[in-house]
Image (cartoon, grey):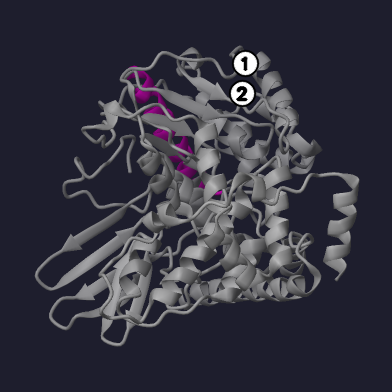
C-alpha cells in the first residue's frame, strides 16, 4: 500500500497487496474469496471431513467446531517439536491436531457457492526476484525507503504515538535507518532498547547507547501521547494472547491495557529473511534444533529428536515443491532461509503483529514489506547475502554502518565496497519529506464497561498462569503424554528459568487443550462450538504447599543430569 494505514473502515474497493495483517472476505454471487496477508500473520486453518469443511483464522475456535463433526487425533510429532522449541516450530502446515491444517501463507481460499466446493489459489511468488545491483532493484529499494519515511513523517505530523525498537543487532538497525532521514524529528519518537540482563540485552543496550550518542537522542524516553488507556480484564488479557498464540508460540505478550488511540511500534521483525546469518545448511539447522532438547529425559529425547528432524525435513520438502510448482528452483544455499519464510516467520512475527493489534497498537514491520522482500540479497558480482543490508546502510544510514554490532558480527569489507560502487552508479538524491495524508489513529475496539475494570499487574497475570499450570488436570495430561520426569522438568523450568520463564507452561496448556479436544471429539450430539479457552477456568489448582518447585542447586543439577541419561 502507499504511505497510509488501511483498515476495514477505509478499505472500500482497494485491492490489498499482501502487506500488513488481515483476513479479507469477499463475496459475490458465485464465490466467496478469503484472502490473507503474505506473512500469514493470523493464520488460516482448514478442517475437512467428507462433504463438511470449515475455515477459520482461530485454530481453537475451529477445533471447538470440528470436534462436534468428527473424530480428531493428537499430532504428537508437532507437539514433540513444539516441546523442544525455543518459542515456535518450523511447521509448514501441521498443528497440534492432525485433522486441522494451516493453509499456505501464499494461498487464498475460494469457495464455490453453487457446488459448495473449496479450493486454493496461489499468489505470485516474487520474493527475491529483482537484482539489487540493477536499476530496477535500486528504484524498488528507493520506493520502499520513501514510502516508509513519508509514513513516519506523516504520523509525527498527526501527533501519533510512535516507538521504534533499537538493539545491537542488524535488523532493528536497518529499520532505524528510516528514522535517520534529516526531516524526521527523533525527539518526537520513543526509541526502545531493553536494559535488563536477559539474553543479549546487556550488550544490545550498550551498543544502542553508542548509536544514541552518535545521533544525539535519548533511549527509552517517555513521550507525550494523545488519548488514554483502559484496563483490560483478566479474561480479556488471557483471551487476546491464548486465542492467538497458544499452540503456536511459547511467549505471551500480555495486553494489560487497551489504548483509546492506537500507537505505532516499528520493529525489525523478519530480518532473518533479508540477510545472511541464518543457518544455511539443513543438516546443521536440524542438529541445532535437536540441541534444544538436551534437557528432555533420555528415552523421550530420542522420540522428540526424531520428530524435530521429520518436521524440518517435511518443511524443506514442501517449500521446494511450492516454488517448483511456480516454476522456480531454490538454490541449496537459500533453502533454509526460504523455509524460514514459509514457517517460523509467520508464527514468530505474524502472531506478534496480530497480538499488538488486538491490544490497541499497530506493529509496523518495514523489512516484511512485499516490495522489500522482492529484492535479491546478493548479485552475480557480489554473492554475499549481506549485500542488500549493506545497501540500506550505505544509501540511507548516515554512517550507522560504522557502529559495532552485537556478537562482534560485521559485514565483509568487500561487500561494503561493492555496495558503495552500486550506490555511486545509481546515486540517491534525498527528497524533502511532505505530509502525504491524514492518518487516523483509529481507536481500538473498547467494551463499554472496560473503563470500570481494575488495573491488573503483570505479577497477577503470571500468578494466574502459575495456577493454571499447577493444576491437577494439566499435571495429569502432561504425565500421561510425556511422563513424570518431563512434568518435573517443566516445573523446574517454571521455577528457575529467567528468559521465557513460562514457555513450558504455555506448552502444557496447549497440549492439554488439544488432548481435551481429541477426547471430546466425535460426539455429534455435543454442544456446537464449546469454548476450549474458557475451559481453562475450570482447572483445579494444586495447593500451594504441594506444588513441585525444585531449586536450582548443585544437587538438583546432578539429579537432572542423571535423569537425562536414564
| Residue 287 appears in the rendering | yes
* Category of crowding for the residue at label 1, using alpha-carbon neighbours closer than 10 angstroms: few (below 14), some (14–19), many (at least 20): few
Quarter residue 483 falls in: bottom right
| Residue 441 appears in the rendering | no
Residue under the point 55% across and 71% down: 319
For mark 2, give the secondary structure. Answer: loop
Horizontal placement of 270 versus 233: left or right?
right
Vertical comparison of 64 with 148: above or below: below
Q: Which of 160 and 530 is in front in this view?
A: 530
Vertical comparison of 2 with 494: above or below: above
Residue under label 2: 398
Residue 52 image point, x, y percent: 26, 81
Q: Nearer the viewer, residue 160 or 359?
A: 359
For mark 1, give the secondary structure. Answer: helix
Residue under the point 48% across and 45% down: 352
Horizontal placement of 428 versus 406: left or right?
left
* Category of crowding for the residue at label 2, using alpha-carbon neighbours closer than 10 angstroms: few (below 14), some (14–19), many (at least 20): some
Residue 338 image point, x, y percent: 58, 62
| Range shown magenta | 134-157
Is label 2 in contact with label 1 (beta carbons under 8 Å)? yes
Where's the N terminus, which quadrant?
A: top left
Measure the alpha-carbon separation of dots 2 and 1: 9 Å
Task: Indicate which label's residue lies in the foreground, 2 or 1.
Answer: 1
Horizontal placement of 346 versus 21: left or right?
right
Horizontal placement of 233 versus 183: left or right?
left
Residue under label 1: 215
Residue under the point 48% across and 40% down: 366
Residue 466 image point, x, y percent: 57, 46
Amino acid at each position: 500500500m502507499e504511505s497510509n494505514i488501511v483498515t476495514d473502515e477505509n478499505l472500500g474497493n482497494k485491492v490489498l497487496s499482501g502487506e500488513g495483517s488481515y483476513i479479507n472476505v469477499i463475496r459475490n454471487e458465485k464465490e466467496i474469496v478469503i484472502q490473507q496477508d503474505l506473512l500469514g500473520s493470523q493464520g488460516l486453518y482448514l478442517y475437512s471431513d467428507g462433504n463438511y469443511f470449515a475455515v477459520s483464522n482461530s485454530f481453537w475456535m475451529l477445533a471447538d467446531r470440528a470436534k462436534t463433526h468428527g473424530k480428531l487425533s493428537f499430532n504428537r510429532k508437532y507437539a514433540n517439536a513444539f516441546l523442544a522449541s525455543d518459542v515456535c516450530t518450523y511447521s509448514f502446515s501441521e498443528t497440534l491436531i492432525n485433522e486441522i491444517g494451516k493453509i499456505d501463507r501464499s494461498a487464498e481460499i475460494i469457495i464455490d457457492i453453487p457446488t459448495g466446493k473449496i479450493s486454493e489459489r496461489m499468489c505470485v511468488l516474487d520474493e527475491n526476484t529483482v537484482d539489487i545491483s540493477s536499476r530496477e532493484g535500486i528504484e524498488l529499494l528507493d520506493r520502499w525507503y520513501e514510502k516508509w519515511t513519508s509514513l513516519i513523517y506523516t504520523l509525527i505530523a498527526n501527533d501519533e504515538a510512535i516507538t521504534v525498537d533499537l538493539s545491537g543487532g542488524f535488523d532493528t538497525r536497518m529499520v532505524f535507518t528510516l528514522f535517520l532521514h534529516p526531516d524526521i524529528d527523533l525527539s518526537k519518537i520513543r526509541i526502545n532498547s531493553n536494559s535488563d540482563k536477559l539474553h543479549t540485552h546487556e550488550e544490545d543496550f550498550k551498543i544502542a547507547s553508542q548509536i544514541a550518542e552518535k545521533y544525539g537522542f535519548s533511549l527509552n524516553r517517555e513521550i507525550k501521547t494523545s488519548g488514554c488507556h483502559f484496563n483490560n480484564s483478566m479474561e480479556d488479557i488471557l483471551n487476546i494472547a491464548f486465542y492467538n498464540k497458544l499452540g503456536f508460540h511459547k511467549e505471551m505478550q500480555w495486553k494489560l491495557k487497551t489504548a483509546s488511540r492506537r500507537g505505532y511500534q516499528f520493529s525489525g521483525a523478519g530480518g532473518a529473511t533479508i540477510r545472511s546469518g541464518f543457518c544455511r545448511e539443513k543438516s546443521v539447522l536440524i542438529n541445532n534444533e535437536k540441541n534444544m532438547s538436551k534437557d528432555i529425559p533420555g528415552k523421550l529425547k530420542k522420540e522428540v529428536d526424531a520428530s524435530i528432524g521429520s518436521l524440518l525435513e517435511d518443511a524443506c520438502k514442501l517449500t521446494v515443491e511450492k516454488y517448483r510448482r511456480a516454476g522456480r528452483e531454490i538454490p541449496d544455499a537459500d533453502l533454509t532461509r526460504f523455509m524460514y519464510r514459509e514457517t517460523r516467520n509467520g508464527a514468530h512475527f505474524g502472531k506478534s503483529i496480530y497480538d499488538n493489534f488486538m491490544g490497541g497498537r499497530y506493529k509496523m514491520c518495514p523489512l516484511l514489506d512485499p516490495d522489500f522482500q522482492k529484492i535479491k540479497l546478493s548479485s552475480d558480482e557480489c554473492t554475499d547475502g549481506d549485500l542488500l543490508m549493506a545497501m540500506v546502510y550505505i544509501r540511507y544510514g548516515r554512517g550507522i554502518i560504522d557502529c559495532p554490532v552485537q556478537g562482534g558480527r560485521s559485514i565483509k569489507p568487500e561487500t561494503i565496497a561493492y555496495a558503495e560502487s552500486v550506490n555511486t552508479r545509481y546515486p540517491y538524491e534525498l527528497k524533502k519529506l511532505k505530509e502525504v495524508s491524514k492518518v487516523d489513529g483509529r481507536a481500538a475496539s473498547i467494551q463499554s464497561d472496560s473503563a470500570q475494570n481494575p488495573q491488573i499487574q503483570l505479577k497477577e497475570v503470571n500468578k494466574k498462569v502459575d495456577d493454571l499450570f499447577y493444576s491437577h488436570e494439566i499435571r495429569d495430561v502432561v504425565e500421561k503424554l510425556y511422563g513424570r520426569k518431563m512434568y518435573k522438568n517443566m516445573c523446574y523450568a517454571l521455577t528457575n528459568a529467567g528468559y521465557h520463564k513460562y514457555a513450558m507452561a504455555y506448552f502444557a496448556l496447549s497440549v492439554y487443550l488439544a488432548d481435551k479436544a481429541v477426547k471430546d471429539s466425535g460426539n455429534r450430539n455435543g454442544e456446537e462450538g464449546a469454548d476450549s479457552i474458557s475451559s481453562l477456568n475450570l482447572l483445579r489448582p494444586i495447593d500451594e504447599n504441594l506444588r513441585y518447585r525444585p531449586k536450582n542447586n548443585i544437587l538438583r543439577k546432578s539429579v537432572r543430569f542423571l535423569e537425562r541419561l536414564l
